[in-house]
Image: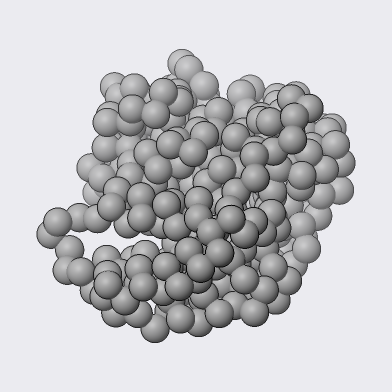
Amino acid sequence: MQDVTDLAFMRVVAHYGAPDYFFTEFFRVHAQSRPERHILRSIDENATGRPVFAQLIGEDIAHMVRTAEALARHPIAGIDINLGCPAPKIYKKNVGGGLLRDPERIRSILSALREAVPGLLTVKMRIGFEDTSNLDRVLDIVNDCRIDLLTVHGRTVREMYRSLVHYDQIARAAARARCPVLANGNVTSAGKAREVVAQTGCLGVMIGRHAIRNPWIFSQCRELFAGREPTLVTLGDVREYTERLYRETRDPGVPERAHVNKMKKYLNFVGQGVDPRGGFLHDMRRTESETELFAVCDRHLLANPETPFAVEPYPGVIARPNCETPGESVDGCSLETVTA
């Protein structure tokens, strides 16, 4: 998740039960680009004990290869290629999900990177740009280029995050691809993860925004896949998570109000599981200081701390678009994964 899955967020998630592996925010690749230092920190300083894949987005083959070779000098698990970001400002540059309009360009990129990357090379894609007419062709290219792992988000680029997820198309991909496939899109809980794995035949799931709402989701998935009852999370637990997230993501050089506004980006998702009427979200969005923010947290989360935190987001309690920063990236450009 661009501007979310940084070193601090990985550290917080790992405290509650790390996924099997992480993917970085995407490294933007072009003629003048160099791997961004803050993203490199999530690789070089990562002490979670989990492998980290370096995610690239771009379409210039020479510079994609150059960047992959530079990143290979860092302790990465492998290189991941983004063919899924649906943000218009991204796909209009013919990168991310925009490349799904040009399968032969994808072939050229993946072929060159397969030659240049001696280790693991993975891909995350959507099921198409306008429709699924190119899906089989792209999957065949993935096979021809000997990709090691494929993640499929079950919407087209044009559908952004608005439509239902087409799990049948993910199943189609899982059946055709020769490499392991992960399912992505609206994996809201451990129960939903189990359902999606059964429905699609995938090896596991990739989880994005619902790890912001519920950082326990990976440990809960692991418990459920092992036949155990998932850990119950209470509103008191969520209050502790909110405090930890605030402290870990705080930059001493950033003014308090700016950091409070950053926290709203996270809490915009957390609030989907606090109360069915959205009262927490309403009050949280109006805070301007640390004191005000935690007064709201205390009022909504500690009044009845043993109250269960909702396993699934409450219907109708949604993240307001202008609070999703950046809204076009928050569910698919850089995610965490758990395998069944």
Indicate whether 269 appears above or below 319. Answer: above
Q: Looking at the image, how many numbered discs can be counted on the residues?
A: 0
Would residue 308 appear left or right of 164 to someone viewing this image? left
Name the residue located 20 percent from the left edge and 69 percent from the top edge: 256
Tell me, what colour scheme is on the image? one colour
Residue furthest top in the image: 118
Instruction: Choose top left, top right, bottom left or bottom right for residue 224.
Output: top right
Name the residue located 45 percent from the left edge and 25 percent from the top edge: 51
- Which of 303 and 71 lies nearest the eye of the viewer? 303
- Which of 87 and 259 lies nearest the eye of the viewer? 259
Q: Percent position (x, y) of residue 185?
A: 68, 52
- Does the rendering let one see residue 70? no
Instruction: Choose top left, top right, bottom left or bottom right for residue 258.
Output: bottom left
Name the residue located 85 percent from the left edge and 36 percent from the top edge: 198
Would residue 49 appear left or right of 191 to someone viewing this image? left
Q: Percent position (x, y) of residue 251?
A: 20, 55
Q: Percent position (x, y) of residue 92?
A: 50, 65
Q: Percent position (x, y) of residue 61?
A: 43, 39
Indicate whether 165 appears above or below 225. Answer: below
Indicate whether 324 appears above or below 81. Answer: below
Would residue 246 appear left or right of 19 to someone viewing this image? left
Name the residue located 52 percent from the left edge and 34 percent from the top edge: 17
- Which of 333 and 189 lies nearest the eye of the viewer? 189
Q: Quadrant of the C terminus?
A: top right
- Does the rendering let one see residue 131? yes
Residue furthest left in the image: 253
- Which of 316 and 339 lies nearest the eye of the viewer? 316
Indicate whether 125 appears above or below 273. Answer: above
Instruction: Choose top left, top right, bottom left or bottom right for residue 171.
Output: top right
